[in-house]
């Protein structure tokens, strides 16, 4: 404040007010960073080790594909389909916006290869094709996604599509995706490797997994990333070290790097035991206060140009408040972005007159060096092939009786222009 008063004396009231507004905006940004949701859980004990706004409704982006995979796994378990069942690209699937593979209508894959593609490439067209193969229509598959979400107790989750591209009314929470990560790990250990593929190859194309922590944070063995402007960069990470398994869910990263640093710091401190004394049993992790249930939308922060060009939406009536956790109710809250706040280097004297020097906050490059290693090879790339599909075919997709699926039009060797 003394600095601002001195500024005012020498440069006038207008510049003084401008300076104070800029300082306030900077402070507001810092407080916004502190509201970005996260949760850290121990997979084996089921305890919540750390959390922040874990019940805040948030756009899931491509984390949605974790539920897509879950519904497919359930269909396989019920023997409705199999890993070698056919998945055919339809007009509706091909019409989805990127990211996508761009295979022509009629192209056929197996369910197994389709799952590998959506986990690594996060291809929206293949995600829709998977839903159609299992349920006949995408909307029917989405109904299954929502039914399973309700059954699992994901009370702050609602899906509109199979891939996670942003739509009004599609939302989740950090807590809910922790529930899904727990269930996928517990119920389908035989499919765990699908979340741990470093890269896939199709023809001459090599498509690397968007989850850089697989190669940059020791012990990481899954799960999924996601990004849309409304949500920022999201990630669910599963890590095992010396028999201890943790899962971190981080939402709202300003970039992939910032998201990765937040997740890695949270996990490292979890393995270091910093949260053990404040852990909360998952079944006791209940809502305790009222918050606005309207899903977050941080497009203005993440994609300012897109935000400026968006059409103004009519204001929606405010829904009734629902209960959710306060940011700091239980457990120890950790926000790596708080490291960027100035740190006091010394203490003032008893009179409080001595000016205190401030440390320069660490950059994200420095934090990256502290919590993430250089990329290292963790396994072989997985080759994707087209065709196959000789397993159960409940929706009557075209194929030779007992033989391989045949695409309606030739399969390209290069990605078609979109």
Image: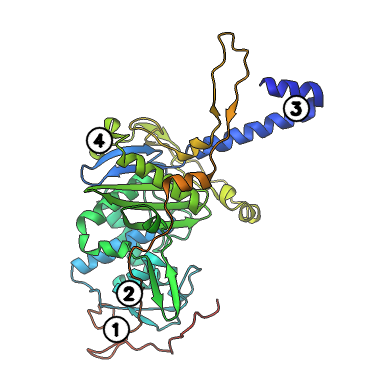
Residue at x 64% of width, y 54% of height: 305
**302 sits to left or right of 289:** right
**Quadrant of the rendered structure where residue 25 is?**
top right
Q: Nearer the viewer, mark 1 or mark 4?
A: 1
Circle 4 sits on which residue? 284
Q: Are marks 2 and 1 in contact (CB under 8 Å)?
A: yes
Residue at x 25% of width, y 89% of height: 403
**Quadrant of the rendered structure where residue 384 is?**
bottom left
Q: Position of residue 185 (x, y in %)?
A: 24, 55
Q: Secondary structure at mark 1?
A: loop
- Crowding at mark 1 (Cα within 10 Å: few <14, some 14-19, many 20+): many
- Crowding at mark 2 (Cα within 10 Å: few <14, some 14-19, many 20+): many
Please state which of residues 9 and 138 is positioned toward the viewer in this rendering: 9
Q: Nearer the viewer, mark 2 or mark 4?
A: 2
Circle 3 sits on which residue? 16
Measured in 3D between alpha carbons, the distance from the residue under mark 2 to the one under mark 4, in whole angstroms, is 39 Å
- Tell me which label, 2 or 4, sits earlier in the chain: 2
Q: Are marks 3 and 2 in contact (CB under 8 Å)?
A: no
Q: Secondary structure at mark 2?
A: helix
Q: Nearer the viewer, mark 3 or mark 4?
A: 3
**236 sits to left or right of 6:** left
- Crowding at mark 3 (Cα within 10 Å: few <14, some 14-19, many 20+): some
Circle 2 sits on which residue? 113
- Tell me which label, 3 or 2, sits earlier in the chain: 3
């Amino acid at each position: 404040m003394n600095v601002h008063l001195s500024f005012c004396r020498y440069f006038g009231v207008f510049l003084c007010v401008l300076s104070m507004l800029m300082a306030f905006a900077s402070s507001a940004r810092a407080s916004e960073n502190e509201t970005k949701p996260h949760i850290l859980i121990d997979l084996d004990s089921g305890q919540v080790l750390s959390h922040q706004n874990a019940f805040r409704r948030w756009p899931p982006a491509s984390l949605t594909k974790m539920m897509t995979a879950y519904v497919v796994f359930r269909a396989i378990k019920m023997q409705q389909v199999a890993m070698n069942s056919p998945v055919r690209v339809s007009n509706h699937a091909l019409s989805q916006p990127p990211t996508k593979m761009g295979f022509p209508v009629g192209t056929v894959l197996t369910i197994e290869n389709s799952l590998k593609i959506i986990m690594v490439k996060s291809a929206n067209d293949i995600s829709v094709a998977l839903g159609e193969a299992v349920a006949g229509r995408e909307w029917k598959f989405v109904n299954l996604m929502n039914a399973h979400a309700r059954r699992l107790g994901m009370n702050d989750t609602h899906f509109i599509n199979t891939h996670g591209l942003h739509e009004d009314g599609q939302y989740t929470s950090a807590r809910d995706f922790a529930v899904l990560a727990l269930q996928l790990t517990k119920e389908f250990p035989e499919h765990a490797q699908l979340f741990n593929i470093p890269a896939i190859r199709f023809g001459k194309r090599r498509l690397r997994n968007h989850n850089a922590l697989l190669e940059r944070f020791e012990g990481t063995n899954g799960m999924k990333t996601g990004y849309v402007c409304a949500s920022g960069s999201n990630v669910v990470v599963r890590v095992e070290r010396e028999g201890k398994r943790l899962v971190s869910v981080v939402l709202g990263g300003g970039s992939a790097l910032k998201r990765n640093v937040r997740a890695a710091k949270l996990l490292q401190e979890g393995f270091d035991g910093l949260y053990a004394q404040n852990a909360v049993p998952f079944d006791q992790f209940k809502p305790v206060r009222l918050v606005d249930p309207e899903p977050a939308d941080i497009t203005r922060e993440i994609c300012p140009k897109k935000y400026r060009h968006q059409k103004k939406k009519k204001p929606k009536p405010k829904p009734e408040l629902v209960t959710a956790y306060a940011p700091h109710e239980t457990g120890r809250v950790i926000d790596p972005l708080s490291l960027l706040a100035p740190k006091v280097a010394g203490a003032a004297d008893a009179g409080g007159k001595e000016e205190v020097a401030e440390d320069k906050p660490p950059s994200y490059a420095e934090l990256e060096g502290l919590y993430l290693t250089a990329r290292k090879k963790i396994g072989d790339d997985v080759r994707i092939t087209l065709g196959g599909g000789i397993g159960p075919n409940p929706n009557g997709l075209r194929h030779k009786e007992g033989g391989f699926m045949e695409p309606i039009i030739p399969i390209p060797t290069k990605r078609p222009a979109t």
